[in-house]
Amino acid sequence: MTALSLKLDLTENDNGYSDLNAFRVLKRYLEPDGDLNMKQATKLLHEMLPSNKKKRGNIDQPDLFSWESLVNMSSFVARTWAAGVVDAINLAVWVLRDGLEDDYDRGEYYSEYISAAAMWILCSGQLLFDEIAQFPRETGESEEKAWAGGPLYTGPIVGLERWLFWQKAFTAAAESSNTNDEATTNALKAANLMDAIARDCKW
């Protein structure tokens, strides 16, 4: 098998998420001599997201994380997932859960959470629908824990019900006065695309 040679010319950034840091993780997972399995790679990508302390507004080191990077990472990894480069179902569920199923006050970062969640629909929506709703994976103890719903969602972890919940949450976000123009646009596009994907589904 021919070895992959992955290269990317990006600016160095060791603090939290950057395209370069995400690329390094994917490179360690994808190359034949890579030292990460899929779960380890997903965990490292997830650790680039803000911690619960940061999410809830108690940020001791605000310079270590750019909230815009939450949106950038979602877009980057969702595209690689849609291209079949990496399996990112766990990360997709985690970001959508944080953005749409949690009830804590995100304050000034609400728009970033909505836009980040929307990236998974806009960049890999059909694949996510297949994995979550139309052809859901068999779920065991690991998935039950990893994909558990947030406080606002109490339905099954896979199936059309969760997809429709997310769609409704995007619609609500698009109508909210708490979202900036970019997040409103992203949320509306995501809700419309989710509706189209579900309607076009051949059950």
Image (cartoon, grey):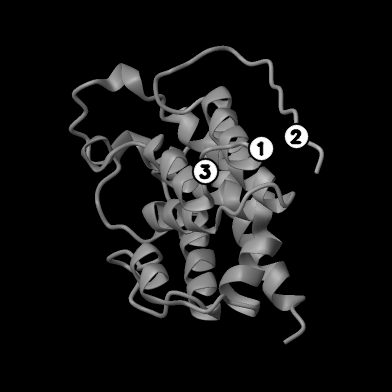
Q: Do the residues bearing badges 2 and 1 touch, measured as CB atoms within 8 Å?
A: yes
Q: Which one is in front in this view, the residue at disc 1 or the one at disc 3? A: 1
Q: Which one is in front, 135 or 120?
A: 135
* Number of numbered tags placed on the structure image: 3
Place residue 113 in its image quadrant. Answer: top left
Type of amino acid under label 1: Glu
Q: Which one is in front in this view, the residue at disc 2 or the one at disc 3? A: 2
Type of amino acid under label 2: Leu
Instruction: Give the x, y percent position of residue 105.
Output: 25, 47
Asked whether the viewer can see residue 181, the reply is no
Q: Earlier in the sequence, mark 1 or mark 3?
A: 1
Q: Give the CA distance from mark 2 to mark 1.
A: 6 Å
Q: Which residue is mark 3?
A: 115
Instruction: Give the x, y percent position of residue 193.
Output: 68, 61
Whether 46 is drawn above or below 104: the answer is above
Left or right for 65, reference 6: left
Type of amino acid under label 3: Ser
Where, quadrant-wise, is the C terminus in this rendering? bottom right
Mark 1: secondary structure: loop
Q: Which residue is mark 2?
A: 4
Whether 97 is drawn above or below 52: the answer is below
Left or right for 163, reference 104: right
Instruction: Give the x, y percent position of residue 168.
Output: 50, 67
Q: Residue furthest bottom?
A: 203
Q: Residue furthest right?
A: 2
Instruction: Give the x, y percent position of residue 149.
Output: 35, 68
Q: Earlier in the sequence, mark 2 or mark 3?
A: 2
Mark 3 Cα shell of 10 Å, populated few (<14), some (14-19), many (≥20): many
Q: Give the CA distance from mark 2 to mark 3.
A: 32 Å
Asked whether the viewer can see residue 6, the reply is yes
Q: Which residue is mark 1?
A: 31
Mark 1 Cα shell of 10 Å, populated few (<14), some (14-19), many (≥20): some
